[in-house]
Image: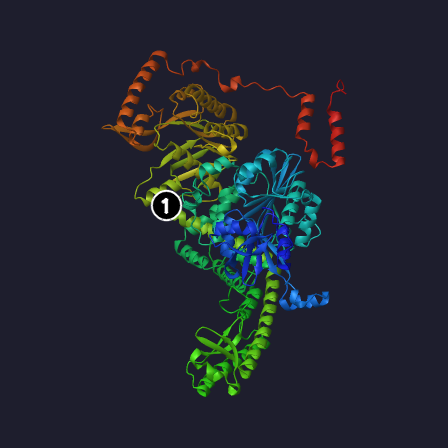
Amino acid sequence: MAALPDSKPTPMMAQYLALREEAGDALLFYRMGDFFELFFEDARTAAQILDIALTTRGEHGGAPIPMCGVPVHSAEGYLARLIKAGCRVAIAEQVETPDEAKARAKREGTPSSKVLVGRAIVRLVTAGTLTEEALLEPRRANVLVALAELRGTVGIAAVDVSTGAMVLEECAADQLGAALARLSPSEIIIPEVPDASPRGSGDLRHSGALLNEVPAFAGTRDIIIYRPRSSFASDAGAERLKAVHGVATLDAFGDFSRAMLGAAGGLIAYLDHVGRGKLPLLLPPVARAAEAGMAMDAATRASLEILESTTGARAGSLIGAVDRCVTGAGSRLLAEDLSAPLLDVAQIEARLGLVQFWRDRPIERAQLREALRAIPDLGRALGRVVAGRGSPRDLGQLRDGLSEAMRLHHWLSGAPDRPALLDAVLAKLTGHGALTDWLTRALVPSPPTDRGSGGFIADGYDAALDELRATSGDARRAIAAMEARYRDETGIASLKIRHNGVLGYFIEVGARYADALMTPDSGFTHRQTMAGAVRFNSLKLHEEAARIAEAGGHALAAEESHFEELVAEVVAARHAIAATAAALARIDVAAGNAERASEADWCRPDIAEDAGLSITAGRHPVVEAALAKAGERFVANDCQLADTNRLWLIGGPNMGGKSTFLRQNALIVLLAQAGCFVPASAARVGLVDRLFSRVGAADNLARGRSTFMVEMVETAAILAQATPRSFVILDEVGRGTSTYDGLALAWAVAEAVHSKIRCRCLFATHYHELARLAETCEALSLHHVRAREWQGDLVLLHELADGPADRSYGLAVARLAGVPAPVVARAKAVLEKLEATRTATGGIAAGLGDLPLFAALAAEPAPPSPEQQLAQALRDADLDALTPREALDLLYEWKRALPKSVV
């Protein structure tokens, strides 16, 4: 933010400037009556983003003060636009009433005419800490992540503040990028470094993981928040978790490493900071093992378009084609399932069994989905209530949702042949009888969003409140009778008794009738003259208005007290309510998956422990759905990989379907291990520990990487991280460089995958010369997508066939794309010349058959010497994170490791 002009400010401006200083880099919403006002650079920024008028108010430093404002009652919509634009907003509310301010001034000896209502920042609104319904996407989780690194291991604390779900995990530093891609956080909290500003400028001296992986994931998005390093101490993190959950030990929650606890400490400290001492809902942390799910790096997730397409939209993504959930919570859980497919056969089969249960019962499934569609988002309503941002409507949603959950429990408990997972979730749908009965008695059927106006406590719940309402009602009826009497007495048929927030109740007549009411003996007192009307008061009206105000004030206070009581009961039951919300989401996911499977005849996959993959008539779910909308049919293809036939080399023309075939098999594996049915006639999937996709590439100019460099970085990651249990899809490796370089790289990569990694792999290429690998690689087989030329036109059949491709049909594809005929003709002449040369010389692959295999060339590297090991240990040491004792221990350890000749 630009520096503010230097001059002696007014008391209000002095208060504003103090709050502006406290807000840091956030925009300041300064409450003034019914508006949030912004001044100076904040006003310019907000006016541009929100497209609202920029005005001025007074002067400061001899210059007009830029100003804009938004109404308090509609602030959420403006906040949503500011957050989407990457802003953070500090909310400065009035924290005392005018009467309280006057009383304070009297105690302080300040003239009451100069007193200013106290204001304070009550909350920071940031992208990762949203709870309001209007600010969140119903079908997308909003994850906040904190990171703490300890000796090469990164602790990760992740929470969805809107529901309170909290997960702690750790990973190796080189796996942080993949973990962040899976979590897809809205904000990332990391320790600030020496000489760094809160925004992270300065000399960054983090180790490679936080220095490289976090900014690489964030890209151009302003989502990295730097916080004091002291917040990330593991001991303090453990104490914060104990305090939040009111326990003396964390043993019941799981076994957490120091890195995990450090990250949790940083996360809770940040939430405490933005909430100004008021923490949101935080459920007990769950420890996630690093090997709990299928690993996928960021490039693979982007290539497979799991949660969003290349355009950033949900449409065109895997979840867009699969999701048939009828609740927002179900869609969020499905996204979590697809982001982290399982590696445990029993857990996968449990999910598949529940999908099968609903697939086999279409009538009951339709009834269930209709019931689920009417259930509010319990998790997020609970989150708002616990965070202190709840409304009577949220309490009503909890009442209705919990009541419906108990009804579902009663209905489904009688279903025969229930799978084990259904029994497990059914147990979490009940146990809320006392709470729902209380909420039903206390609340009106449709509670309002705003509790400030009252009217949400049901009649008959509180006799004293009913009496206050009766008093207020009697007074209103008396005012209505008074209006009729005044009309008769004055003879003014248009006389009305009205009310507003400034004058209260008043009598209004047209200007031409005002003189009769102005006389001293009329019984009326002049209040205000308008353009076409005049307003009056009377003693009797004042008395009745006072009765209404007094009764109404007491009634509002009583309702507020009841609201707090109900909130306290909900907070006490928060863990059980959250468990019910999670159970409903799991049922919705299973029923939605069953619905999707029924729509397109998807099959239940068989899950095995071996390294095979057998898919019959597999289809790409996204492409098939797009073709169905256009009235076209998707051509299904088989894929059979086994230990003796684990690498398929696939050729054929562009647009022939190679990339689609590669991706569809990867997506089928992903869906199967996520516990979903798959788009195939039959499928048997051997567990995949890591899924890699190098299909398509784009340059990354922001990081100085060309398309080919991006391709090589992704390929290097595959070669370094893939295991024999992995599944790899590679498309046109080597295409971004010269023909000789590209062919050489593709040849070497194919050999490495086949003979060194020995994993399942689909390898699409236009290098026909690679077909010679089949002569030396026993587990490699050749395949191609079929195409034909008919009367000069290319016909793409999209069918996979055995054997090598005879040609690439590049010129025919160019003609289809609209390349001018003279250019195509010239290309044909050049191609004929090149092919003639190839025939004469044996082509660019001549002599490659004499090369030894990759495995024969790969020699075991010499082990590092003790000196080299010590040098590497010194490089890896995070000196800033070491305590003096840890540093001394390391020195002794290194000294013992050195050979005596060196010592």
The residue beneath circle 1 is 600
The residue drawn where x is 73% and y is 22% is 898
Q: Residue furthest front?
A: 62
The residue drawn where x is 29% and y is 25% is 823
**Does the rendering let one see residue 853?**
yes
Image label count: 1
Could you say whether the residue bearing mark 1 is in a helix, strand or loop? helix
Mark 1 surroundings: few (<14), some (14-19) or many (≥20) residues within 10 A: some
Residue sitting nearer the eye, 538 or 356: 538
In the rendered image, which quarter contains the C terminus? top right
Q: Residue furthest top?
A: 840
Colouring scheme applied when the structure was drawn: rainbow
Res. 644 image quadrant: top left
Residue sitting nearer the eye, 786 or 45: 45
- x%, y% of residue 481? 48, 84
User: Above or below — where is 231 with respect to 687?
Assistant: below
- x%, y% of residue 224? 58, 42
User: Above or below — where is 284 with respect to 210?
Assistant: below
- x%, y% of residue 19? 63, 54
The residue drawn where x is 76% and y is 35% is 884
User: Above or below — where is 871 with respect to 270?
Assistant: above
Identify the amino acid type marked 1.
Answer: Ala
- x%, y% of residue 190? 62, 42
**Does the rendering let one see residue 777?**
no
